Image (tube, rainbow, N blue to C red):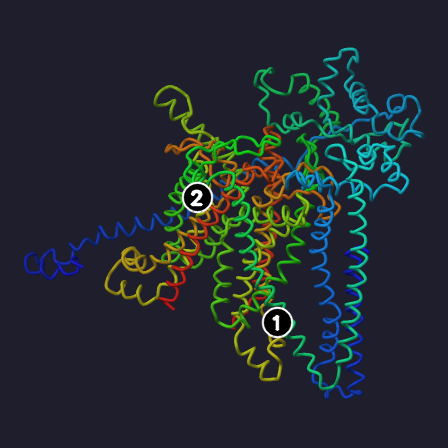
Amino acid sequence: MSTSLLLLIIALIGFIAFLAGRARSFTRSAGKLASLHSLPGYHGSYVAIWAMLPALLLLAVWLIVAPIYIDYTVRSSLPEPVQNQGAATVQLALGQVKSVAAGFGRLNADEIAAIENGSTNMREALAAKGVALAGEGEPYMIQSAQQFNAMRQYSRWLMSAIVLLVSVAGGLFAIRNIDVRFRARNRVERVMLGSLIVASSIAILTTVGIVASMLSEAGRFFTMVPPFEFFFGTVWDPRFAGAGSGGASGQFGLLPLLAGTLYIAFVAMLFAVPIGLFAAIYMAEYASPRLRSTAKPLLEVLAGIPTIVYGFFALVTVGPFLRDISAQLNGLVTGNYQNFIQAQSVITAGIVMGIMLIPFVSSLSDDIITQVPRALRDGSLGLGATRSETVKKVILPAALPGIVGALLLTASRAVGETMIVVLAAGVAARMQLNPLEPMTTVTVKIVNQLTGDLEFTSPQTLVAFALGITLFVITLGLNIYALYIVRKYREQYE
Amino acid sequence: MTEFASPTVRVSTRPAASRRDIGIKRRYAAERRFRAFGISAISIGLFFLAVLLWSVVSKGYTAFQQTTITLPIEFSEKVIDPKNERATDPKQLYTANYPLLVREALVKQLGLDPSKRPLVKQATDMVSASARTQLRDIVVADPSVIGRTIPVTLLAEANIDSAFKGQIDLSVDETKRKVKDEQVAWMNQLAEVGVLKKSFNTGIFTFGASSRPEAAGVGVALLGSLYMMLIVLVLSLPIGVAASIYLEEFAPKNRLTDLIEVNINNLAAVPSIVYGLLGLAVFVNFAGMPRSAALVGAFVLTLMTLPTIIIATRAALKAVPPSIRSAALGLGASKMQTIFHHVLPLAMPGILTGTIIGLAHALGETAPLLLIGMVAFVVDFPGSPLEPSTALPVQIYMWANEAERAFVERTSGAIIILLIFLIFMNLGAILLRRRFERRW
């Protein structure tokens, strides 16, 4: 029985249970519905929950545990010589056994018998059914594959039976409880509360998942490449993961990537902060309501545009424009029409990322500036200060902590930005100071290392997780500090 | 402060100039400068918005037109099935020499001499190589066309398409461009008799991936994005609302809920690529889900969207006045009933607005999808979210990496499609807010 069919049947049982529970509450109350403690719907829901929840939980546990158990059993039944060849070989053999097993599922009994007595080649027979086997199958695999298939089938059958039994038993147990004074609503609400709590814990689980997955993969990377070489290496040259080489052949220095990331983020902030801040000040302090109500949403459109669009804009418009204009300038001055800005460069990526960040800076700062109490503003204006003096000497100092928080949040976004730099910054990992040359970033390298065919055992792949955790820690630090500042600032004026 | 103090001193020494010399002029100039800075900052921002949109639209609007060549194709039995084997060997119809049909029709149309091979080759190069599959599909779908002559609308090759749209500078020396003089002459000749013409490009919406620009479209990507958005909506809305209800209405104020709160704010600011790493490590590597599948992409995007929805929902719940709650509780409703029957419906417009904005972000997100392998060359439409598919922004990324100029047009066209979707979603959010916004 397939899992989806099973789910459907459980849902059906749940529905029937609901109707039965409701009906029973009607009959118990003998027509006087007001005598019931809970509304009939709650009685129905109570029974339905008992019919479905335990069964579904059991199903979930079974679906997770059974494959692990079957893997373990099949693995330990592999022949001695294979077992002794180390974890990687065993894993490989297990993978082959599984593909053989999948292939057997498509063959009929005669064909399987032919393979077993060696009259047909297993690989060819399976290939004919569309199952590609990596390498010639060993004879022992046939046995293991059949064991695997048998166990899986047995497990499915057992699971279906037990889950359905639990479902029906749960419903029957619950329906006996239904009575006039039975507090069905309170129980149903307790389950609802439980599900609310589960939902809110997903946020925590996500963080735990991020940290755990990255730490474990990065940990594997650090067993191949010492952390010191990663964090303080100045050369990024991971080479390609040769098939089966497995060794750490390349150099994985973080510093050139970090330098590029911070440089591009710096250029972007240099571009976005003055524009965004002045826009925010003008909108908060000077603009008429009409201008504000049109200009603010329009600027925020910039924040709604997907970053891939910015990347494309940098690639086909800004990059070539900067390159051509630099060639023209060079030609006018020296007579040599050679461009001195590369199409892919720190400045291209920085400017385009800066455009993207303008609305972040402006709306975050706008919120903070408008939170400065009216009294401070009026006091300053009343003493004869002009508006700009009020802004510079009263409002900005008062809003400064909040603005710093906003800028830190923006910086964290600049550091973590991916698509713009992938398309506009280049891939050359170099440490240099010229903003007109290409540099690369942490995020670009994560994408580079993880697109294409992956082998989860090579340092070339795993380094992406080490880069990821570095990025996560940097942005987390910036975010937590920024949120702390912004929160503190809010309390100050509330 | 010294400026304010100085006039009293000056009154005694220079009575005539008493109130003038406190730097009013200078201060007003500074004021005007400051104001000009502000205006120019806003204008620069809007200018860049305009340049960005203009650059995309001016490069991309032509992608919605496609040059086609309508030729009377003779599905001659001699070419398709010379030995009359199609009844016994259905493969025959798949492997037949369909390009020959196109060549013959074109030679006849242009009145060329079939023995001049190079010339004929140049002529057939004007038709997209996708004509082979197009004709094959016609024949396979209805083998009775064999032996008949019917007009078929074929795609023009990408360079001819560009030339016909006037995007190729024909004054350049012939050897330096991809369209030859003869081809231009034929193109004009065919255009005059109405065989070659521009029409609305439906292909960009329906085709899958292709290495030929004229046969490439965002159809598969649109379907993949649709799958993902549906799953993201189905998962993130209930989970997000449930989480916010707990945090806003039930959670006791303690360290744990404080931690959750900080956590959610943080997750909203985690770089999207980190979610991609999470998806790769947990869903693909650990749980063994298929790479490139829309389902995995949707899970990743759900985790990414949840913080946005939770933050919006909590704000919406907070905005419902306590009087509603008190009234319901006073009439004997339980806390759960109060929230689900009264507070939640009133907060719904705000919640939906937040959800739509979250979905719009998810629709445009690229980086995490690259990591879970959605950068695949997918030609066929995925039948379910478990099959390999791609997404609209990822398709844009892949096309942006293609060197051919015709792909620049396609990429911009795909961006326009993406932006139109986003505009509609955001307009929907705005309208929702306008329609149902309530001031208590």
- Of badges 1 and 2, nearer the viewer stands 1
From the image, tell me which residue sits under label 1: A193
Dot placed on the residue nearer the N-terminal end, 1 or 2: 1
Residue depicted at x 38% and y 32%: A432
Question: In the rendered structure, the residue with mark 1 lies on which chain?
Answer: A
Q: As displayed, is residue B80 above or below residue A189? A: above
Q: Residue B279 appears at what percent x and percent y? A: 60, 48
Instruction: Please identify the quadrant where the C terminus of chain A is shown.
Output: bottom left
Are the residues at dot 1 and dot 2 in contact (C-beta closer than 8 Å)? no
Count of labels shown? 2
Residue depicted at x 79% and y 26%: B71
Q: Residue B380 appears at what percent x and percent y? A: 74, 39
Question: Quadrant location of residue A136?
Answer: top right
Name the foreground residue: A72 vs A18: A72
Name the foreground residue: B274 vs B238: B274
Q: Residue B336 appears at what percent x and percent y? A: 62, 75
Which residue type carries mark 1? Leu
